[in-house]
């Protein structure tokens, strides 16, 4: 920067000398010839300084990427963004069979570092808070298929037989919530870098199983944003 300023100053002086020379030329040719060596020196010095000045480079801005960084979107992990009172209010509003069990549902999520609002949104999308489908029988927050350490039942609630469509069944919504949180925190999801709604859904409810992945994502995120704003009813 200093070199550039010096070069610029020299050029300014050169311009001034040229103007002076034009005036002097009208009155004295000898005086003009006497100034030429000085002007030449100034010009040479200015050019040398400008040439030797280091170029200023602005570093390029690159977006950091890493395989260990979760994909962008709504993370399921973090501090609770809704309260136990809100959960109970929401469950009661939708006439859920899990109404009044907000404390247990909240606690299971917090124990795994999951925001209860996310857990509740999956519960809402999968079964309308236990009002629809297999959740009426299984007490499953996330409508889980058969997993270890849980009963495996068919669509009638009986013991699963080969070739039947079967689901994990739990003795309570508390147990169902714990199993859901444990699954999402396992090596199948969190251990594989899937920690956001956007990254989890394609594995949790893939299009190959006739699911609309984007609609599922939108549904969960809309519900979460609704409850975080203090409202109860989710408007699709």
Image: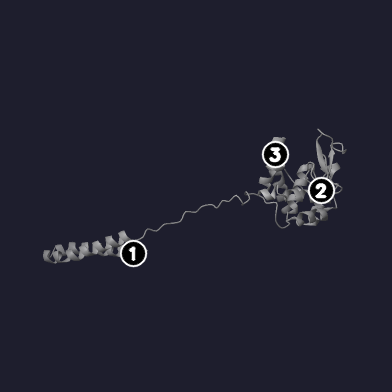
Residue 202 visible, this angle? yes
Residue 29 lies, in percent from the top left, at: 12, 63
Q: Quadrant of the C terminus?
A: top right
Q: Give the label on residue 176, or none.
A: 2
- Is the residue 43 above or below the residue 194 in the image? below
Mark 1 closeness class: few <14, some 14–19, many ≥20 residues within 10 Å: some
Determine the image quadrant of residue 163: top right
- Is the residue 229 above or below the residue 211 in the image? below
Q: Secondary structure at mark 3?
A: loop
> Seen in the image, is 2 located left or right of residue 130?
left
Q: Secondary structure at mark 1?
A: helix
> Seen in the image, is 166 located left or right of residue 14?
right
For marks 1 and 2 on the same chain, the one whose residue lies earlier in the sequence? 1
> Seen in the image, is 168 located left or right of residue 37?
right
Mark 3 closeness class: few <14, some 14–19, many ≥20 residues within 10 Å: few
**Whole-number angstrom distance, CA of label 3 to CA of label 2:** 21 Å
Give the residue pinned by disc 1.
3
Give the residue pinned by disc 3.
206
């Amino acid at each position: 920067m200093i070199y550039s300023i010096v070069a610029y100053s020299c050029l300014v002086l050169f311009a001034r000398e040229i103007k002076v020379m034009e005036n002097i030329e009208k009155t004295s040719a000898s005086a003009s010839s006497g100034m030429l060596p000085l002007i030449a020196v100034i010009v040479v010095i200015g050019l040398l300084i400008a040439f030797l000045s280091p170029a200023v480079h602005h570093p390029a801005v690159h977006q950091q990427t890493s395989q260990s960084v979760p994909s962008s979107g709504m993370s399921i992990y973090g501090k609770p963004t809704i309260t136990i009172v809100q959960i109970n209010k929401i469950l009661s509003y939708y006439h859920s069979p899990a109404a009044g069990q907000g404390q247990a549902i909240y606690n299971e999520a917090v124990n795994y570092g999951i925001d209860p609002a996310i857990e509740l949104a999956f519960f809402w999308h999968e079964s309308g808070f236990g009002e629809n489908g297999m959740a009426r029988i299984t007490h499953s927050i996330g409508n889980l298929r058969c997993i270890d350490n849980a009963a495996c039942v068919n669509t009638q609630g009986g013991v699963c037989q080969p070739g039947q469509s079967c689901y994990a069944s739990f003795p309570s919504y508390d147990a169902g919530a714990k199993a859901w949180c444990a699954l999402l925190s396992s090596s199948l999801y969190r251990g594989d870098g899937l920690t956001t709604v956007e990254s989890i859904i394609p594995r949790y409810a893939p299009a190959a199983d006739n699911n609309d992945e984007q609609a599922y994502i939108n549904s969960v995120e809309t519900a979460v944003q609704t409850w975080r704003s203090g409202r109860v009813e989710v408007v699709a």
